[in-house]
C-alpha cells in the first residue's frame, strides 16, 4: 500500500538555539527547505515539511525552536517543541561545541517517557569535534549513537542516513497492509460507502480510498456501493462475499442485509486494528455498559472539519450513548492534536475517532494519559458497534484472522 501523508514517518530535529538544526535539515535532504541564519532563535515554532530523504524515503521532518529559548515567549516556544515529542517516530538531537546541560537532559527524559527512538549529533564538527568528556557525560544519561557531523563538510552523510534507518521503529519504511491477514488473493470485498452531508463533495474520505487501494494491492476484487444498493446487488448477482467493510454510521442497517456467515466490520475498526491502540480498545469498549448517571465522556477528534448537522462525534455518538445507557451523560470534545484535559480522572471513558490523519505513534501517545490513569478507551467504530449490539460480529474478523 502506498503511504499517504499521514503514514509517513515523522522525524523531529531538536537542539539548543544556533546548533545548526535548519542547516542540518537542508543538508540531509539536499534542499533549502529550512531558513538558515546566524542569528539565534530564527526558528520560532515547529515547522513541518514533507520531504524525501535519499536512501530512506518520504518523511515528515519537523524543525523545532531552540530548547534554550528565553523569556515568556521563549517558554511558550519550548512548550510547543516538547509537544512535538508526542507525535514523532524518531528524534534527532543536535549539540555543538561540546555543550550539553539540563536542556538536553530534560529533553532526553521526554524521549524516554514517550518511547521515542533517538540519536545525537555533535554538529559543526569542522570547528570542534566531540571530546571524550562530552561523550562520557552523554552516555551517563543516554545509551544511544553519538556522531560528529558538519554541514559544511558532510563527508559522513551516509552514516547519518544509516542511523535514521537504524533508529526508526521496525518496519516503518516498509509497505504495510490495511487488510493484513484479513483477506487472501482472489477474495471479493464489499465496501459500503453511504453518501451523506459529511461526505466531501466529489471525492471519498481517506479510509475509503485506503481500503480500495489495499484491496487491489492484495490481489482481491472490490465491490463499492452505497448502503441502499446492497439488497438489490445481492439479489441480482448472488456473489459470495469474503468480507464486508461498512461506514460505522450504517452498521446496524448493513448488518441486517449481510448473512451472518460473511465477516462484517467497519472502516473505523479497520483503522483501529491497523494503527490504533487496538488491544486497549478491545478492553475498554465493553466498559460502556458500566456508564452511570452524570458520567462524563471525552470524545477525541483528530482533524479540524466543518461541523455539519448530524456530526458523528458531536451529535450522533452523544445521542446513541444516551439512548443506550438511558442515563444523563455529559460530553467534552477535543479536536486536532490538542492535549487531553488535565482532569482526565473526571471521565468515565475516552472515545477516539478513526484517526485516519494520524500515525500510530500519535494515536498511542494521545491516549497514553488516559490509559495510565486507568480510564477505558474506545474508538468510534467499536463504540457504535457495541451500542447497537454488533460488537462481537464487528471484531470477529480480527480475532479469527486468515
Image (cartoon, rainbow, N blue to C red):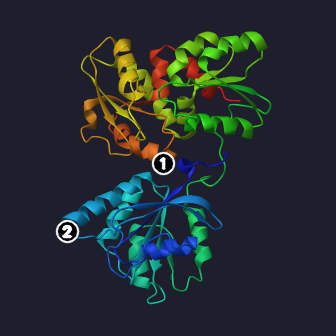
Q: Residue furthest front?
A: 202
Give how far apart the Cα atoms at labels 1 and 2 are: 31 Å
Give whichever of 380, 190 is nearer the camera: 190
Q: For the point 25% across and 66% down, which residue is it?
A: 74
Left or right: 318 with respect to 189? left
Per the image, the residue denoted by label 1 is: 361
Per the image, the residue denoted by label 2 is: 71
x, y (%) of residue 39?
A: 33, 80
Quarter-of-image position of residue 321 = top left
| In the image, residue 201 above or below residue 369 | above
x, y (%) of residue 298?
A: 33, 31
Can you see residue 142?
yes
Please, what secondary structure does the residue beneath circle 1 have? helix
x, y (%) of residue 209?
A: 62, 37
Quarter-of-image position of residue 180 = top right
Quarter-of-image position of residue 58 = bottom right
Please, what secondary structure does the residue beneath circle 2 have? helix
Can you see residue 259?
no
Disc 1 packing (10 Å; few <14; some 14–19; many ≥20): many
Disc 2 packing (10 Å; few <14; some 14–19; many ≥20): few
| Quadrant holding the C terminus | top right
| Quadrant holding the N terminus | top right
Which one is earlier in the sequence, the residue at label 1 or at label 2? 2
Q: For the point 66% across and 15% down, which residue is it?
A: 230
Foreground mark, 1 or 2, reads 2
Amino acid at each position: 500500500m502506498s503511504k499517504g501523508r499521514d503514514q509517513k514517518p515523522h522525524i523531529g530535529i531538536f537542539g539548543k538555539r544556533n546548533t545548526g538544526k535548519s542547516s542540518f535539515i537542508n543538508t540531509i535532504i539536499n534542499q533549502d527547505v529550512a531558513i538558515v541564519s546566524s542569528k539565534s532563535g530564527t526558528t520560532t515554532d515547529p515547522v513541518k515539511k514533507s520531504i524525501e530523504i535519499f536512501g530512506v524515503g518520504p518523511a515528515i521532518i519537523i524543525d523545532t525552536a531552540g530548547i534554550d529559548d528565553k523569556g515568556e515567549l521563549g517558554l511558550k516556544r519550548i512548550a510547543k517543541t516538547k509537544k512535538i515529542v508526542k507525535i514523532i517516530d524518531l528524534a534527532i538531537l543536535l549539540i555543538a561545541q561540546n555543550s550539553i546541560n539540563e536542556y538536553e537532559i530534560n529533553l532526553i527524559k521526554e524521549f524516554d517517557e514517550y518511547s521515542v527512538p533517538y540519536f545525537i549529533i555533535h554538529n559543526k564538527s569542522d570547528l570542534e569535534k566531540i571530546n571524550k568528556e562530552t561523550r562520557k557525560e552523554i552516555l551517563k544519561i543516554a545509551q544511544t549513537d553519538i556522531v560528529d557531523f558538519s554541514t559544511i563538510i558532510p563527508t559522513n552523510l551516509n552514516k547519518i542516513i544509516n542511523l535514521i534507518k537504524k533508529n526508526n521503529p521496525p518496519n516503518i519504511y516498509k509497505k504495510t497492509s490495511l487488510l493484513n491477514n484479513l483477506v487472501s488473493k482472489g477474495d471479493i470485498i464489499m465496501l459500503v460507502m453511504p453518501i451523506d452531508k459529511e461526505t466531501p463533495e466529489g471525492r471519498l474520505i481517506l479510509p475509503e480510498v485506503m481500503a480500495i487501494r489495499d484491496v487491489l494491492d492484495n490481489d482481491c476484487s472490490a465491490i463499492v456501493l452505497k448502503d441502499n444498493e446492497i439488497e438489490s446487488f445481492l439479489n441480482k448477482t448472488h456473489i459470495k462475499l469474503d468480507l464486508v467493510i461498512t461506514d460505522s454510521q450504517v452498521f446496524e442497517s448493513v448488518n441486517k442485509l449481510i448473512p451472518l456467515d460473511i465477516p462484517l466490520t467497519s472502516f473505523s475498526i479497520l483503522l483501529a486494528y491497523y494503527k490504533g491502540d487496538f488491544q486497549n480498545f478491545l478492553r475498554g469498549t465493553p466498559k460502556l455498559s458500566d456508564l452511570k448517571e452524570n458520567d462524563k465522556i471525552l470524545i477525541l477528534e483528530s482533524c479540524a472539519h466543518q461541523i455539519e448537522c448530524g456530526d458523528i462525534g458531536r451529535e450522533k455518538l452523544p445521542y446513541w450513548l444516551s439512548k443506550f445507557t438511558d442515563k444523563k451523560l455529559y460530553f467534552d470534545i477535543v479536536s486536532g492534536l490538542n492535549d487531553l484535559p488535565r482532569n482526565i480522572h473526571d471521565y468515565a471513558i475516552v472515545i477516539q475517532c478513526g484517526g485516519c490523519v494520524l500515525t500510530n505513534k500519535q494515536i498511542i501517545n494521545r491516549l497514553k494519559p488516559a490509559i495510565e490513569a486507568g480510564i477505558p478507551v474506545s474508538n468510534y467504530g467499536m463504540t457504535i458497534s457495541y451500542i447497537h449490539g454488533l460488537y462481537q460480529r464487528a471484531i470477529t474478523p480480527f480475532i479469527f484472522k486468515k
